[in-house]
Amino acid sequence: MNEFVCMTRVVSGRGSISALKELHLQRLLLVTDPFFARNGTAEQVAQAAQAECYEIYDRVEPDPGVTLAAEGAAKVRAFQPDGIVALGGGSAIDCAKAMLYFSGSGACLAAVPTTSGSGSEVTDFAILTHDGVKHPLVDARLRPTMAVLDDGLLTQLPPQLAADGGFDVLAHCLEACAAINASPITDALAHAAFAAAYAGLPASFAGQQSARLPVHLAATMAGMAFTQAGLGLCHAISHSLGGAFHIPHGRLNGILLPWVMDCNTPAASRAYARLARAAGLGGSTDTLAVRNLRGGLIRLRTRLRLPASLVQAGADLALLREKQDALVEAALADPCCRTNPVEPDARCIRQILEAARHG
């Protein structure tokens, strides 16, 4: 039996932060990072909600950890908001989700993403880092009530963030299509999102503002797809490496995807071929379509000036060797493995790490 549930109201377009006032909040806690607090964006978004009173919690940092989540949860319990608005990239949204979850608050959650990648604004997922390992927190209560996709907040998006986030979108689509819980609805979302992101990323990377909203929407559609269908081995290994080496998540996905595809193709060739054709990459046979998809990802990665290997991304080779067993163990324990089309084992993960080391 297939089931598709989307409880998040999605509003999009320039000026759509004004929709926050429709939540009719009395006490608003806005969760963000110091950058948006300093430049006035946090204040702008908080005022758009027209709450009777609000406070700004601006201590979010990249790869938020359990300690930060606990501190934030204490803030929620002390302030007792009826609504939380998360402003920022995946780290801010995930931190707000964890704060809500661990505080036990019944406040509603709205997400205002300022990067186009994680899809966290519509998912049941949050990622927390602890002892150098990224741990997915998965619970239906983490899915926001509202997602606001305001491209007016993307005008200053740096090219590197556009590239990193874009490859996270592509990885979400590719893994959702091949995941064991994929359905016709998740496939439709993933195919459309992949095609839009694949076509629009070069222009977004170059700073073309008209390309920003389509890629932003693609990130959200990909989030809807993978939160229902599941993810896979690429994300499991990326979580393992990201916690240990602090390399941006989307950048790791770009390095790993071709090698993960090689591992999964025996079971996922049909899914990959359909995705390739949906993106206009063609292929008269499934084998050719999969080859075109793999090659297209590598060409786009180069065009977006992303690294092709862990070494190019700055990973310390000696530390990589030292931590290999722990990395493999963490990847195998990651819940994303549960929906991978091939049941992964330690040998497979070691092969992927070896291939990704030098590209």
Image (tube, rainbow, N blue to C red):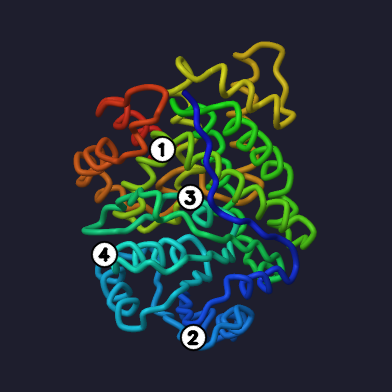
Q: How many marks?
A: 4
Please name the residue that numbered disc 2 is placed on: 54
Looking at the rendered structure, the kind of residue marked 3 is: Thr
**Front label number (1 vs 4):** 4
Please name the residue that numbered disc 4 is placed on: 66
- Outermost top residue: 285
Query: What SS does tag 1 mark?
Result: helix
- The structure residue drawn at horizontal position 30% and vertical position 48%, both measured from the top left corner, is 317
Residue 306 % position (x, y) = 56, 50
Looking at marks 3 and 2 on the same chain, the residue that comes earlier in the sequence is marked by: 2
Residue 180 % position (x, y) = 44, 25
In the figure, 358 relative to 285: above or below? below
Q: Local crowd at mark 1 within 10 Å, few (<14), some, or many (≥20)?
A: many
Please name the residue that numbered disc 3 is placed on: 123
Is 12 in front, or is 293? 12
Looking at marks 1 and 3 on the same chain, the residue that comes earlier in the sequence is marked by: 3
Looking at marks 4 and 2 on the same chain, the residue that comes earlier in the sequence is marked by: 2
Query: What SS does tag 4 mark?
Result: helix
Q: Local crowd at mark 3 within 10 Å, few (<14), some, or many (≥20)?
A: many
Give the alpha-carbon distance from disc 3 to disc 2, as whole Å.
Answer: 25 Å
User: Quick check: 206 left or right of 20?
Assistant: right
Please name the residue that numbered disc 1 is placed on: 356
In the figure, 20 relative to 263: above or below? below
**Front label number (2 vs 1):** 2
Looking at the rendered structure, the kind of residue marked 2 is: Tyr
Looking at marks 1 and 4 on the same chain, the residue that comes earlier in the sequence is marked by: 4
